[in-house]
Amino acid sequence: MNAIVELTASAHVADVRGALAALGVWTRTLRDSSARTLILCGPGSVPLDLDAIAGLTGVAAVAQEPSPHPLLDAQAGRAIPITERLAIGPGAPQVLIAGPCGAESEALVHRAAAMAAAAGATLLRGGAFKPRTSPYAFAGEGVEALSWLRSAADAHGLALVTEALSERDVDAIAKVADIIQIGSRTMQAFGLLRAVGAAGKPVLLKRGRAATLAEWRLAAEHLLAAGAAGVIFCERGVMGADPELRNTLDLAGAAALALVDKQPVIVDPSHATGRRDLVVPLSRAALACGVHGVMVETHPEPALAKSDAAQALDSDGLAPLAELFACTPGVTA
Ligand code: PEP
Ligand code: MN
């Protein structure tokens, strides 16, 4: 946490900065809108001691610079409880989340849940409401698919994460989901963030394709301010320049949030690459960076997937991840 130091009328800026430096803090001179000189200072070799700073000659007042996301700061360093047996984030075991892009049918969702459980996943994913670039593309089966997802998750002892695309569907989703997902395209749909936050559930917040880390953190603050029980960040690739890759996986951004901010972070290499041949290697890379889990798209018969077929893993494709999560692969759905 930084502080802002206001000077007395007679103070010499260089003298006050020297005195602050002697307290072991870094300083920077700022001018505010009425042209007063202020000194921004932050913890250097030692933490800030506001009382010691206030007592320096030439200092009229000192105030903590408020964080733009106090609620997010408050969840740092702890895992978010999801169910009685499952938590995601710092201190909890890394998780595997697996399932289809879209909940296409009841049978598909059950087969995908069996695949996920066999691979050591603890959460089933799958969209009942799909954000699609074209209005004519498969957009999910809607409310009916929510009950398929819940019963498939229960049948295989999995928790469930599924996306809310519209404020209209939040109540129905909150009744079945353990975690509500905010998709990349709606990361800054602030009305949706408020409605999802108000449901009081943990939220998986995907990063917008062109969002900065600062914008991502503030979207999380919107959710928490509205009442979300916790926010898990999901890095799913940012806009890149190469058409051979759907997006560019920003492992540095994910690591910054997980290791420096100490926030719960998972990585989705499926949407980051759009290619099943890269999903397992990038999952390994993400887990090696110390993020708290990975989310991958699966399908028992990828060629038949109604959306994102090129990135879906079948049972054989999932097997290396099953090894990573120390489970027995090979149970076919
Ligand atoms: C998804 O995970 O189902 C999805 C639509 O991903 P994204 O929002 O990252 O594109
Ligand atoms: Mn998808």
Image: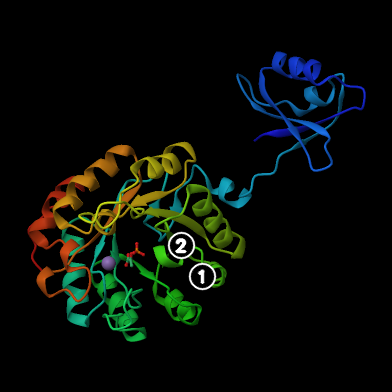
Give percent across and percent down for residue 152: 25, 74
Image vertical order of residue 329 relative to residue 160, above or below: above
Q: Is residue 108 visible?
A: yes
Which numbered dot is residue 175?
Answer: none
Q: Amino acid at mark 2?
A: Val
Q: Residue furthest bottom?
A: 144
As helix, strand or loop, the secondary structure at mark 2 comes to strand
Residue at 92% across, 27% down: 9
Image vertical order of residue 4 relative to residue 254, above or below: above
Residue at 23% across, 54% down: 245
Front-most of residues 225 and 21: 21
Front-most of residues 331 and 317: 317
Which numbered dot is residue 196?
Answer: 1
Q: Is residue 6 left or right of residue 46?
A: right
Q: Is residue 329 left or right of residue 191?
A: left
**Within 10 angstroms of label 1, few (less than 14), some, or many (20 or more) residues?**
many
Give percent across and percent down for residue 261: 49, 40
The answer to whether mark 2 and mark 1 are in CB contact below 8 A is yes
Give percent across and percent down for residue 255: 39, 40
Quadrant location, ligand no. 2: bottom left
Tell me the quarter of the picture where residue 227 sits: bottom right
Q: Quadrant of the C terminus?
A: bottom left
Q: Amino acid at mark 1?
A: Val
Front-most of residues 244 and 290: 244
Q: Quadrant of the N terminus?
A: top right
Which numbered dot is residue 203?
Answer: 2
